Amino acid sequence: MPVAVVTDSTAYLPPELVPAYRLTVVPLTVVLNGAEGLEGVQTFPADATRALSARRVTVSTSRPSPEQFVRTYRELLDAGADGVVSVHLSADLSGTVEAAELAAAQLGDRVRVVDSRSCGMGLGFPVLAAARAAADGADLAGVRAAAVDTIARTTIFFYVDTLEFLRRGGRINAAEALLGTALSVKPILHMPDGAIVLRDKVRTASRGVARLVDLAAEAAGDAPVDLAVHHLAAPQRAEQLLGALTTRLGDRVHDTYVSEAGAVVAAHAGPGLACVVIHRRC
């Protein structure tokens, strides 16, 4: 049986890709006013965005437990998988990678954990590459290498209406959040090495979308690319962004994906998010 590929719910893959690529998704937990729900199973983006718009609400997230990962890995290995490659969101944003590594340590060398240094389809593209390698018969090392190689060729940029939610969750430092608020600017961020960093500032949402297109085109260079666009309660903004990108990059664009980010990102980014992920093909 091929190597099994595991990821977590923050990959925000279009739903049809999960069975098509034989992926296993372990959900993170979202806590809204003390009520816990598994992302994408019990708690959805609209739940988090509604909660964030209310006053005196607490929203937080938590990683899967090591025990959840142990159960998942054992089920796949007992079903006949030759091994497991488990690819997850950046360790700078979540303890998910740590939990997966603790679980893998209980199962010897049959499980390899990969930190994508990203989230959304910045995680999803490496997951798909690993799944394709597994389907082609690659061994454990080969499947892991496919994910790692794709991470090096994947770039993420995103726009948020405010830095306040990222500040509350500790995902960006208070000085950067204060700067954005004081100047009434709209921030554009990226993840050059797994942490969220302020990349640019614009005055309006429309300029934010235009700047995302410029940055994505710069990141693509002359290479053929796959594109993914995420949004939070902003589907028109996502379609506008994808249309502008495909026009700008022309026939160099191969696969494209559009999906709403989930409740975990909603809890930390807030409504209005627009995100583009560029995967440079070999």
Image (cartoon, grey):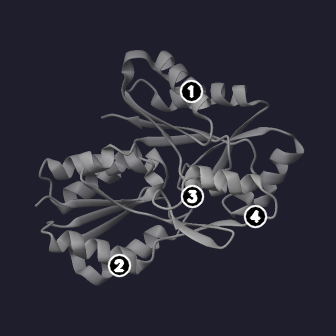
**Residue 280 image point, x, y percent:** 38, 34
Give the residue type at disc 2.
Ala
Label 2: how many residues lie within 10 Å, few (<14), some (14-19) or many (20+)? many
Query: Mark 4 or 3 closer to N-term?
Result: 4
Q: Residue at x 61, y 55 (%)?
A: 47
Q: Which mark is residue 241?
A: 1
Numbered badge on residue 264: 3
Residue 57: which numbered mark, if any?
Answer: 4
Q: Is residue 224 left or right of residue 259?
A: left
Residue bearing the label numbered 2: 103
Q: Tell me which amino acid carries mark 4.
A: Val
- Please state the horizontal and vertical placement of residue 134, each as a whole percent of the image: 18, 53
Residue at 74% across, 50% down: 163
Say what amino acid the circle numbered 1 marks.
Leu
- Label 3 amino acid? Val
Secondary structure under badge 1? helix
Query: Is disc 2 in contact with disc 3, using a CB cutoff of under 8 Å?
Result: no
Q: CA distance from mark 3 to mark 1?
A: 22 Å
Which numbered disc, 3 or 1, marks the residue closer to the eye?
Answer: 3
The Cα atoms of the two marked residues, 2 and 3, are separated by: 22 Å
In this picture, is 189 found above or below 253?
Answer: below
